[in-house]
Structure formats: structure tokens, C-alpha cells
Image (cartoon, rainbow, N blue to C red):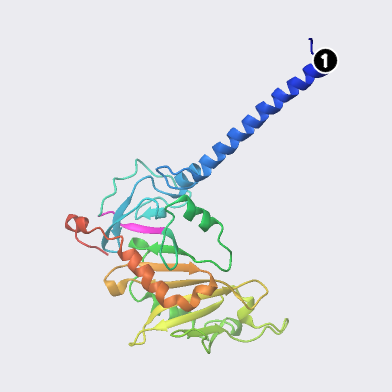
């Protein structure tokens, strides 16, 4: 029995549709492999990994401490002597050893368990985090030529807060009762006469929180900025030094404002996390430097 013209055309369309579905299915599988594939560069798209992450463990001198850091932990790693942004390296990259001075790198960790981006599940959780309410810390670690020197928190405080004659009145800070135990709060002084809004809510500098030790020295400096047009914080950035451990390391943790009351625990956990980079087997290779 011969198939009519309509039957022939219908059969061709069925074949075309099946082929299209197979191509689409293959594309979906390829995309999933591209996004979640766990390769040598970590659990993220290859181009992003190549641009931000190292293909092997990071070794170097971190503020006087020999370290070996698993490859999936740091991103945007920079050593002293590396070319700046937009510059090209002259010659091949030098061989990195525990004597190579690290300048800066970033790390994403989840608070309070300090998990890193070591699996597709953690990457998925990190990428789905909410803007103002989540548990991930964005760490910036600086040492080497980027370390501002011991006592820089005191110098930053002196340059910012107790010098009311250096700036106009809208840039002056005043102490306010602090809602956070252990911290002093300083906010921009006065009200904008044109809008009737307090200067602290209009300026991008935000509020400043300070912690001092028993000697009166500043050991923690936290800046919390406001969401535009509101009296609510958008994020906080906490700075402290590892100089108490004999290390030239500047640490900054950025986090959602809901975590501000846990500032002491954050500082303690991050400090232990960074000290965990120490490579005890490398201590005999070199003498600590700052």
C-alpha cells in the first residue's frame, strides 16, 4: 500500500522533530557538563576558572608564613612583582616556591563552618545566596608589598574620625550608642538642610565600628554601608591584622549585615582558617620574612 503525499510529508516532519529533540537534549547535557563539571580548575565554567583560579596548589610566603593552599580555595592570586592590571608579563612566569611573597588573593567561605567552594553543591549554594541575608564571607587577604604595616588600623582611625577640622561638617564623625557589644559606633554628623535626611544615610561611607584592646589600640575596623534610600545596612567590611601572630597580613571580611553581631567569632574563625594555610614541611626551606 503506497503512502500518500500527506503521509510522506508527515513522516518527514516526525523525523525532523526527533532530530531536533536529540540535538536539544545533547545541548542540555553539554551545558550541564560545562557548568557543573569538576575538572582540574574547580567546579565552575572552564573560562571563568582559567581567568580567576590557579590550575595547581598555591605556594608562597604569606606575611612571613610559608603556605600551601589547595587550588580550589584562592582566586585572583597575585605575587609581589606580578604585572599590574592591563600590563603584560615580560618573559615566562617565575617558578613559585615558599620564598615567593604573596601580595593578595581572595577566598569565599561559608560561615560558621568555613566551607570553601570545593563541590558543585557548594558552588550552587554560593551562587544562589541572597543579597542582604546569607552566610558567605568574601575574604580579601593582603601581604607582601600590599601590607600597610603594623599599626595601620590605629593610623586609619586617627585619619578618619578624630580630626573634625580636616573636613567640612558633613564629613565629621560623631560617637553614637553602639547596638553591638564590644564595638564603638561612629556616624556622619548632622542633617542635610536641603533634604532633612541625616548625613549618615546619604553618604556612601556608611557607619564605622571600632574595637580596641586593653591598651586602647584599634584592633578591628568595620565599615557598614547603607542600602540606597534606606536606614538599613547593605553590607559590612571588617578589617583586622595578623600582626599579633607575628605575621604581616591584612584581612578583610565582607558579609551581609545580619552577621555583624558575630563579628568577634568571624574574626577568630577567619584568623584560624588563614593560619591553617601554614605548611609545616616548608618551614625548613626558608626563613620567615616580612
The segment highlighted magenta reads 99-105
Give yes or no for residue 104 being in the magenta stretch.
yes
SS for callout 1: helix
Name the one closer to the observer, 191 or 98: 98
Q: Position of residue 239 (x, y in %)?
A: 43, 72
Which residue is found at the position 36% from the left and 87% from the top? 216
- Classify 10 Å Cα crowding around label 1: few (below 14), some (14-19), many (20 and above): few
When the figure is inspected, residue 75 is found, relative to residue 207, above or below; the finding is above
Q: Position of residue 46 (x, y in %)?
A: 48, 42
Name the one closer to the observer, 258 or 29: 29
When the figure is inspected, residue 271 is found, relative to residue 67, above or below; the finding is below
Name the one closer to the observer, 90 or 175: 175
Q: How many marks?
A: 1
Q: Is residue 137 left or right of residue 142?
A: right
Which residue is found at the position 43% from the left and 85% from the top? 182
Query: What is the quadrant of the N terminus in the image?
Result: top right
Give yes or no for residue 238 being in the magenta stretch.
no
Would residue 148 be visible to someone looking at this image? no
Q: Position of residue 165 (x, y in %)?
A: 53, 86
Q: Residue furthest front?
A: 1
**Residue holding disc 1:** 5
Which residue is found at the position 72% from the left and 25% from the top? 14
Query: What is the quadrant of the C terminus in the image?
Result: bottom left
Q: Residue furthest left?
A: 284
When the figure is inspected, residue 136 is found, relative to residue 86, above or below; the finding is below
Q: State the image quarter where residue 23 is shown.
A: top right
Would residue 169 be visible to someone looking at this image? yes
Q: Position of residue 218 (x, y in %)?
A: 39, 81
Which residue is found at the position 65% from the left and 83% from the top? 198
Amino acid at each position: 500500500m503506497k503512502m500518500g503525499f500527506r503521509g510522506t510529508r508527515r513522516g518527514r516532519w516526525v523525523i525532523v522533530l526527533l532530530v531536533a529533540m536529540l540535538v536539544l537534549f545533547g545541548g542540555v547535557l553539554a551545558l550541564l557538563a560545562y557548568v557543573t563539571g569538576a575538572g582540574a580548575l574547580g567546579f565552575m565554567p572552564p573560562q571563568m576558572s582559567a581567568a580567576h583560579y590557579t590550575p595547581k596548589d598555591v605556594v608562597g610566603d604569606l606575611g612571613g608564613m610559608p603556605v600551601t593552599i589547595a587550588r580550589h580555595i584562592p582566586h585572583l592570586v597575585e605575587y609581589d612583582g606580578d604585572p599590574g592590571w592591563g600590563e603584560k608579563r615580560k618573559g615566562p612566569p617565575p617558578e613559585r616556591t615558599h620564598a615567593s611573597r604573596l601580595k593578595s588573593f581572595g577566598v569565599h567561605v561559608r560561615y560558621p563552618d568555613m566551607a570553601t567552594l570545593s563541590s558543585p553543591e557548594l558552588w550552587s549554594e554560593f551562587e544562589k545566596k541572597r543579597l542582604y541575608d546569607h552566610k558567605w564571607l568574601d575574604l580579601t587577604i593582603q601581604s607582601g608589598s600590599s601590607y600597610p604595616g603594623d599599626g595601620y588600623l590605629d593610623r586609619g582611625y586617627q585619619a578618619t574620625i578624630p580630626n573634625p577640622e580636616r573636613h567640612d561638617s558633613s564629613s565629621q564623625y560623631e560617637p553614637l550608642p553602639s547596638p553591638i557589644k564590644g564595638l564603638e559606633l561612629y556616624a556622619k554628623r548632622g542633617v542635610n538642610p536641603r533634604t532633612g535626611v541625616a548625613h549618615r544615610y546619604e553618604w556612601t561611607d556608611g557607619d564605622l565600628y571600632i574595637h580596641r584592646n586593653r591598651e586602647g589600640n584599634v584592633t578591628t575596623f568595620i565599615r557598614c554601608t547603607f542600602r540606597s534610600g534606606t536606614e538599613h545596612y547593605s553590607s559590612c567590611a571588617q578589617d583586622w591584622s595578623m600582626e599579633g601572630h607575628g605575621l604581616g597580613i591584612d584581612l578583610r571580611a565582607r558579609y551581609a549585615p545580619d552577621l555583624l553581631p558575630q563579628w568577634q567569632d568571624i574574626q577568630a574563625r577567619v584568623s584560624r582558617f588563614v593560619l591553617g594555610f601554614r605548611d609545616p614541611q616548608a618551614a625548613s626551606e626558608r626563613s620567615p620574612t616580612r
